[in-house]
Amino acid sequence: MTSSVFLLVVVFLLILVGIAGTIVPLIPGIPLIFISIAAYGWYEGFQQITPKYLVIIGTVTVLSVIVDYLSTSIGAKYAGSSKKGIWGAFIGTFVGAIFFPPLGILLGPWLGAFIGEYIELQDANAAAKTGFGTVLGLFSGIIFNLILALIILISFIIVLI
């Protein structure tokens, strides 16, 4: 196996890990995909992977990172959360993902939003509604990033052909 074929296989494996990272926290999903494609472009002298293509997927990468960080909080806000509920969702996302994977991915944001909202309103029903909106926002962000990752993969294959 030549070194260029080997490198291309490694890039595709890293892209697949990046796609998994859009679902699994702590794996830098789309940024990993971007870095893999950029490294391959550098290796092949930016003949197939052009600077223009890298700017486009770089922009998509920045968009995905913004969506990733904001989707949970936006979901909480959409459900009528207070600032404490939004902060709770934000903190719960990281605590759940780091200390209680994989179930913490679901429970962390919900529980964080619930606790923050309950502290603010002292109303368990409103806090539960906020927790649901938070999880809905989280999954909306995951689906959005998964679609972006698949689009980048398809565009990479097209560029190589």
Image: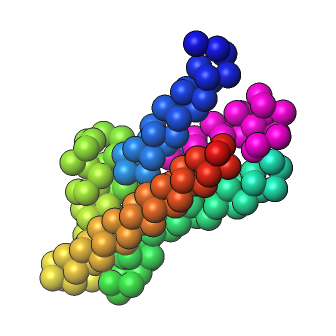
- 4 relative to 111, above or below: above
Quarter of the image for residue 122 reads bottom left
Residue 36 included in the magenta stretch of the image: yes
* Secondary structure that dominates the magenta span: helix
24 to the left or right of 155: left
Q: Looking at the figure, which quarter contains the C terminus?
A: top right
Q: Position of residue 101 (x, y in %)?
A: 27, 41
Give the residue drawn at x 70%, y 54%: 58
Q: Is residue 64 visible?
A: yes
**Count of numbered tags:** 0
Magenta span of residues:
29-49
Q: Position of residue 94 (x, y in %)?
A: 40, 50
Q: Residue furthest top?
A: 1
100 to the left or right of 37: left
Q: Looking at the figure, which quarter contains the N terminus?
A: top right
Give the residue drawn at x 37%, y 55%: 93
Between residues 5 and 78, which one lies in front from this camera angle? 5
Between residues 62 and 40, which one lies in front from this camera angle? 40
Residue 79 included in the magenta stretch of the image: no
118 to the left or right of 148: left
Q: Position of residue 158 (x, y in %)?
A: 62, 51
Between residues 2 and 68, which one lies in front from this camera angle? 2
